[in-house]
Amino acid sequence: MSSSPSLSARGGRLALLVVGLCWLAVLFDGLDMFIYGSVLPHLLENKTFGLTPDRAGDLGSYATFGMLVGALTAGTVADRVGRKKLMVGCVVLFSLASALCAVSGGIAVFGLGRTLAGVGLGGLLPTAISMVSDYAPRGRGALVIGTLMTAHHAGGILSAYVAKWLVEPVGWRAAFWVCVLPLLFAPVLARSLPESLSFLVAKGRTEEAGALAERYDVELPAAKGAKQGAADRWNALLNLFRGGEWSQTLLYWLASFGGLLLVYGVATWLPTLMRGEGYALGSALSFVVVFNLGGIVGMLVAGRAADRFGAPRISALWFALTAVGVYLLSVHMPMGVTMVVVFLTGVFLNSAQVMIYATVSLRSTPDNRATAVGWTSGMGRFGAVFGPWLGGQLLASGHGDLGFTAFALAGVSSMVLIGVAALRGPRRGATGSSDPELLTAH
């Protein structure tokens, strides 16, 4: 018994190593995701590759389309090769894709690089969340996952500094070469990260899983029953439309579409739109830093607020406040006031979408919850593809000043849709908004 505290402390340190490695991987994920938006004002001003705003919007959508593909295929690939190998593969893929962008001589090769990067980015985040869920200390799963999600926004902050320090003196290609550096991290990840306990248990490698669980002093995941067949999955999807549920399901899907349109539209175009409002490039990139700092705070406080006041109520309120903040960005205000507005917009915008998943989870039956949240997330990712494209089309048509207004209207629509859906649907579940699975869908 005397060795128990020592084992627990040692297991805690090892678990911290796993979380730390995954946090760094997601940090690089965020850097690669946000770097395009950070260098975009420079690309447009210098007409790199003859880039126009509408083509820039298309390029922004390539990465989010790749993320859609990566997210949809990650589970299947992970079940075959393991979550550790998939994480390493994703880091290698988006690093090499950034190298392709850095050496590209035309818009076609650059677009291919952004698409491949998106595939890696889309596959990494849910896999990393699964990994830290397995190795999180007992009773700390939601806290650890919330902490992991802050890495994505920390990567956004890093992307702004990379652009500020390198783009003007060295050139935009240098920023993408920085995004290749995670390639050096891949061998460290392959050597030091243990395999997912859930994967080992699912593959029947229970002795290996038990040894790892004891070494890291974490709970061994329970073995799941037989996997759902295609008929079972199809029936679970149909249940979302039976018995009058179709209207509520569509409302959630549309709300998620508007939410991710807003998230990725603003993430792609914020520096460019702020430049259009008359701010210098350095100030526009500073807004990216402040916006992502708000995102970190929002991820840490949204769950607590929803637990206290209810996920549907917080979801609708968060989108309303996001819409106000985004619209105010179209008004040229004193720098200090603008910084506060950007920060608060980041707080609400980056966690409002998670509150949609919390609401869907709360209003779903336990046996259909995973399907409901997963499909709500999947439909929302089409909004992630549409958002960057929409910003480019507005700028190309000479209506860039309407960009913030269009994104604000997306926030209003999601507020209305999630509110109506919550009013129509009965409260069935008992899950809270801090459920770790909700964050995987972001």
Image (tube, rainbow, N blue to C red):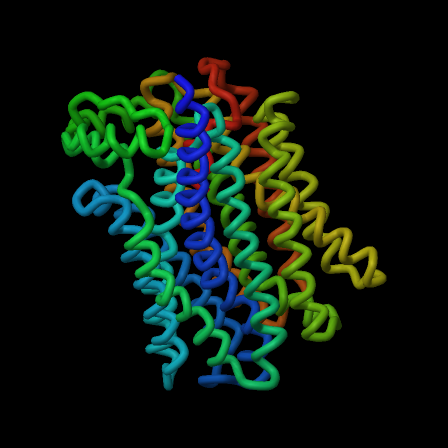
Give left or right: position of 429 versus 416. left
Examine the image and state in which quarter residue 311 appears.
top right
> Looking at this rendering, what residue extends furthest in the front direction?
2
User: Can residue 251 be seen at all in this image of the molecule?
Assistant: no
Please determine whether, in this image, residue 391 is positioned above or below residue 76: below
Please determine whether, in this image, residue 57 is positioned above or below residue 138: below
Percent x, y of residue 118: 37, 59
42 and 255: which is toward the camera: 42
The residue at 47%/60% (across/down) is: 33
User: Can residue 363 be seen at all in this image of the molecule?
Assistant: yes
The residue at 47%/37% (across/down) is: 145
The residue at 40%/29% (across/down) is: 7
Percent x, y of residue 152: 51, 52
Percent x, y of residue 119: 33, 57
Percent x, y of residue 46: 56, 85
The residue at 41%/48% (across/down) is: 22
